[in-house]
Amino acid sequence: RINTLLSDANLPPSWWTELVDTVVYLKLRAPASILQKKTPYEIIYGKPPSLLHLRRIGSRAW
């Protein structure tokens, strides 16, 4: 999965660990059926996560 992200975003292999961190970050903010469609973030903090700051991997951010 990480190698696919690297390839799709045209990023060098040196970004591998950054993408691992990003995948974990995103997984904590994605709904899980085992959690009755809540996110792990919601279970921990009691409120849904804000996703407004997210951008496509490899896009230019300001």
Image (spheres, rainbow, N blue to C red):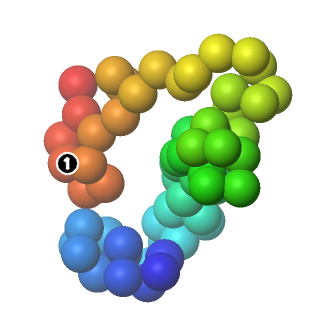
- Amino acid on which the number 1 mark rests in the picture: Ser
- Would you say 5 lies left or right of 39 here? left
Residue that numbered label 1 is attached to:
59
Q: Residue at x 31, y 54 (%)?
A: 57
When asked about the image quadrant of residue 49, the answer is top right
Camera sees residue 22: yes
- Looking at the picture, how far across and down is residue 14, in whole percent? 49, 72
Please name whichever residue, 58 or 27, is drawn nearer the observer in this view of the structure.
Answer: 27
- Would you say 54 lies left or right of 14 here? left
- Looking at the picture, how far across and down is residue 17, in whole percent? 61, 65
Q: Which residue is most to the front?
A: 36
In the rendered image, the vertical position of residue 29 relative to residue 18, given as above or below: above
Q: Residues within 10 Å of mark 1 (few under 14, many from 20)?
A: few
- Would you say 34 lies left or right of 3 here? right
- Looking at the picture, how far across and down is residue 29, in whole percent? 56, 40
Please name whichever residue, 35 or 29, is drawn nearer the observer in this view of the structure.
Answer: 35
Quadrant location, the C terminus: top left
Please name whichever residue, 8 or 60, is drawn nearer the observer in this view of the structure.
Answer: 8
Q: Which residue is most to the right?
A: 44
Q: Residue at x 53, y 71 (%)?
A: 16
Q: Residue at x 62, y 37 (%)?
A: 38
- Looking at the picture, how far across and down is residue 55, in whole percent? 28, 39
When asked about the image quadrant of residue 10, the answer is bottom left
In the rendered image, the vertical position of residue 61 relative to residue 10, given as above or below: above
In the rendered image, the vertical position of residue 41 relative to residue 30, given as above or below: above
Camera sees residue 25: no
Numbered label tally: 1
Secondary structure, mark 1, is loop
Q: Which residue is most to the top?
A: 47
Q: Residue at x 68, y 32 (%)?
A: 41
In the rendered image, the vertical position of residue 12 relative to residue 38, given as above or below: below
